[in-house]
Image (cartoon, grey):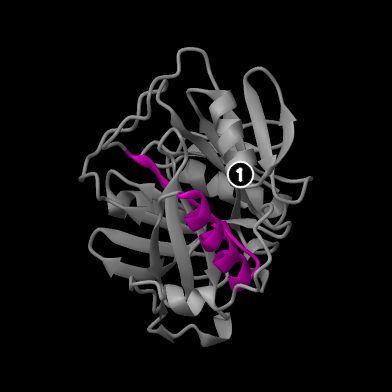
Amino acid sequence: MPFHRKPTTFVSHVHLHVQNLERTISFYQDTLGFHVLYQTDSEAAFSADGETALITAGQPIGVTPKERYTTGLYHFALLLPTRKDLAKIVTYFNEIGLNFGSSDHTVSESIYLADPDGNGIEIYADRDPDGWTWENGEVNLTVDPLNYRDLLAENDGAPWKKMPEATLMGHVHLHAADLEETEDFYLEGLGFEMVRRFNPQTHFIADGKYHHHIALNTWHGVGAPAPSPSSAGMAYFTLNVADKEKQIAITSKLESLGTPVTKTEDAVWAADPSGTKIKIVV
């Protein structure tokens, strides 16, 4: 399904600030099984297919521990190609004693963990979109216990060796300061659609009838502050749009809404009302 390729608008990459780059490389390469696409003294990029960076981690001078109770990243989500891949990584995490949470969302099955800096990570597999149910324009997305017995029955006994090549950045889930104001930015400014109002504090938005490309919550409180510039965490995420015309249209719309926009040779930069930075690329 074309949920993570053009002409759909989708999240493709996150850029993190971390306190210890070597520790971060060890986690993403040795524990999760990513390729290190490149590495410098202060930055490394991680790829599933050896070509495309899904995660970049930088260690800026003066970086401080990830601040709590702020806006910004709740988790980024890695979408695995198959349910069997999810079963394999669950088995592997159990074998190495890595703690994780889990949930069945009806549209998908997920596990949750954090990297050494406390950046939340979801690893999930989608169920067949033909089986998703929609009512009044909203997808049936739930939070139920994961059936481990049923999931692990998918495991063929082959060990987990590396992140599957077809793994994608599935979505990001963000803490917002004000749900309505932040939603307006993504819906009116970027052209997403509301696909699930889960409760008054948690909403899901998407393009192309995906279950969500971006989730927003106010779990850190209405009016939560943005993290300080020195804080470890997500520096920005990358949003891919269909073509140059779409990028220009989004830029014009954001400017008409009063959102400051910065244009570079290969991207348009903006920040949502909660302070989360976005790199918009073609």
Q: Is residue 244 left or right of residue 189?
A: right
Q: Secondary structure at mark 1?
A: strand
Residue at 64% of width from left, 56% of height from top?
168
Could you tell me which quadrant the N terminus lies in? bottom right
Q: Position of residue 141 (x, y in %)?
A: 39, 74
Residue 171 seen by the camera: no
Q: Position of residue 216 (x, y in %)?
A: 36, 54
Q: Is residue 33 magenta?
A: no
Magenta stretch, residue numbers: 71-97
Residue at 71% of width from left, 48% of height from top?
282
Residue at 35% of width from left, 74% of height from top?
142
Along the line of sight, which residue is nearer the eye, 114 or 130? 114
Q: Position of residue 108 (x, y in %)?
A: 48, 72
Up-down relation of residue 145 to residue 124 (above or below): below
Dot 1 crowding, Cα within 10 Å, few <14, some 14–19, many 20+: many
Q: Is residue 138 left or right of residue 50?
A: left
Q: Position of residue 135 (x, y in %)?
A: 39, 85
* Residue 46 found in image quarter: top right
Question: Which residue is the site of mark 1?
Answer: 280
Q: Is residue 83 magenta?
A: yes
Along the line of sight, which residue is nearer the eye, 177 or 80? 80
